[in-house]
Image (cartoon, rainbow, N blue to C red):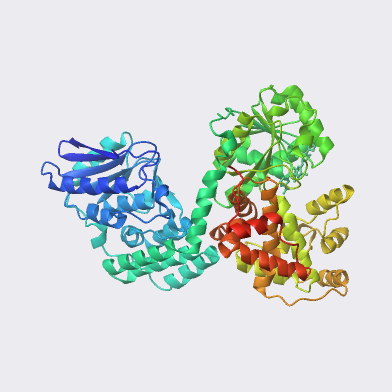
Amino acid sequence: MVATITRDDGIAVVTIDNPPVNALSQALRQTLWDAAEELEADESIVAVVLTCTGRTFIAGADVNEFGKPPQPPYLPDVVARIERSKKPWVAAIHGSALGGGFEVAMACLFRVSDASASVGMPEVRLGLVPGAGGTVRLPRLTTMETAVELVTTGSSFAATDALEAGLIDTIIDGDLRAGAVEFARQALENPLPLPLSERPAAQPEGDFWIKAEKAVAARARREEAPLRALACLRKASEADFEAAMAFERETFLALRASPQAAALRHVFFAERAASRPPEISGVPARDIGSAAVVGGGTMGAGIAVALRDAGFEVRLVERDAAAVERGLGNVAAIYGGSVKRGRLSAEEVVERVKGVHGTEDYNALADTDLVIEAVFEDLEVKREVFNKLAAVCRPDAMLATNTSYLDPASIAAGMEGPERFLGLHFFSPANVMKLLEIVPTGHTAPDVLATGFALARKLGKIPVRAGICDGFIGNRILKVTRAQAEQLLLSGIAPHAVDAAMRAFGMPMGPFEAQDLGGLDIAAFQRRAARDRGETPFAPVADRLCAMERFGQKSGGGWYDYVKGERTPLHSETVERIIGEEAGDRLRQVLDDDDIVDCIVLPMVNEGAKILADKVALRPSDIDLVEIHGYGFPRWRGGLMHYAQARGLADIVAKLESMSTRGLSEEPCALLRSAASAGEFPNMSG
Ligand code: NAD
């Protein structure tokens, strides 16, 4: 039973109970249909309140039905059935009313909520548009500006904003169900409004649509659904209700079958799978009530902010009083940015900053549950830090390193209690980037690993389990990206051409622009360390730029020149000369944008396959998440490995072979070849 009906002196209360999130399964759709029929026929009933049990209103479609042929009754019919009821329905919203859930709420004549509610239309995030009249009814309920914002970005509105935008009629203090019943009674005392399908749609003026299209296209960067959603809203404004409904349906069905929707569904399921690695299934996480960060530089300050934003009081440990001041200054600077961007109010920031406590005394960590180290990338410095931590922290405190390249096992070697230690690799800026690589050593206890995943959830991060190797998953692939980008330079392709091709592919930045932004020095430091280990990293041009202290934007020049205080990359004659010298008499290639992209992305796929073979990643989809959430790989392409698989692994192998004969890449690895024969990558998590 997914819903019950109770009767309260002429008001029927339909209570949906379909845990965990009251998703619109076939059974629920049928139940809503039957309830509408039954209550219409029941002469004792004058109005209906629709409410949900559990933590939320109808949170959306049933994910178990994703990608499967839909079963009747279809949602548009259920929505229409509720809407044409002769008795007013009142949706009583708590938690989230998203997608189909908000479409059902819009079928009701009224919407009331508690203060915690939020409403939205997240379909574009799955490559879709709303499919049950969302784009047609929304501009009949609110302004076109609001409709465009909700539908094309997939964002949601909290109750107070929703009230202001007219998306809900009132916010109820106290008991929502009782308040909604009372609201229904009072509503009956006044003339009832028309259902949304009979109201006129918003008619924006002037060049609204031209501007909106420009803005949406710029944000969507080749993602189809946002522009298609905008077209649906325009149709709702310009055509009658029925024609707009037909247009939305047609758009919905076309998108549902599109490769982008398949890719976005893949990412959705990848994120769910990544947060539950089989090795910790059933293992309870430890309670983390207090947290500390050692090192208040770029990463430490960002991690402290991430912890603080998740509600922790944070201790920030630095080397000496001056460094503590600098660390706290870094934290304050990050929060200053949040105020500037309107993410937090000045008062909220004061509160957050107050909750980060600087100290140079390790003894202050005696009672801390979790300590994350983010000091210099130096094995001896880190070992010393962990020996100190092991001495002062409780034996059950969890200790983590944010190292990028060092072997976490050797950092913990000799430390007391290595079972409480693991790698938590954040990405910069740590308070913004969603990816968290979680790296257990051979000694990490299962509940410590489980706690790493629970922490990621608490911080709003996407956790990916990574094995130990140089650079874990993300930076190991990044090394290939950069080496390939330099190969292209030596083959006669200019930096701006490489960057433009990668941006056209869907990356937010090209590889050279990204290096100029982040700084070339960190990678140079890694290459020096690699050479000390006897390796031969390939970065002839970057090495020369670093020797000239061209570290990127921060030093006024890197792969590009910069006018002081500006960020626009300008062609650099110095770089052109160095490339020419390093290329020598190497054969110049003529490559179009697709070839340039292949020359970078396909070797990354090959490295991904090696990472799978080494079991550094458990699943190809984990690599997808690393690339999407750590490096901006377009989500609508489904991530690196999904992109390769969707394109055809046999094609990828053939292309890599042909590139390798021209000296443009390595040969495809054994796992990639066998995956090409099988038609798909293996899942190593089972
Ligand atoms: P950073 O140089 O900005 O900061 C390091 C901080 O550690 C400094 O403020 C320093 O005073 C402090 N410190 C050094 N020794 C200390 C000690 N014994 N006790 C307390 N504090 C000490 O470096 P960063 O970029 O923040 O990197 C820190 C770590 O994070 C490194 O391991 C790095 O590899 C890793 N990491 C960096 C990035 C990045 O993009 N910068 C990304 C992921 C991981």
Q: Nearer the viewer, residue 423 or 227?
A: 423
**Residue 118, x across and y down, in percent:** 40, 46
Q: Nearer the viewer, residue 70 or 162?
A: 70
**Residue 396, x across and y down, in percent:** 66, 23
Above/below status of 32 relative to 250: above
In which quadrant of the rendered view does residue 675 lie?
Answer: bottom right
Above/below status of 447 relative to 77: above
Q: Nearer the viewer, residue 548 or 122?
A: 122
Which residue is located at x 78 percent, y 42 percent? 406
Q: Is residue 129 visible?
A: yes
Which residue is located at x 42 percent, y 48 percent? 63
Q: Is residue 568 visible?
A: no
- Viewed as shown, does residue 568 lie left or right of 20? right
- Viewed as shown, does residue 77 lie left or right of 588? left
Q: Nearer the viewer, residue 161 or 615?
A: 615
In which quadrant of the rendered view does residue 199 lie?
Answer: bottom left
**Residue 112, x across and y down, in percent:** 31, 45
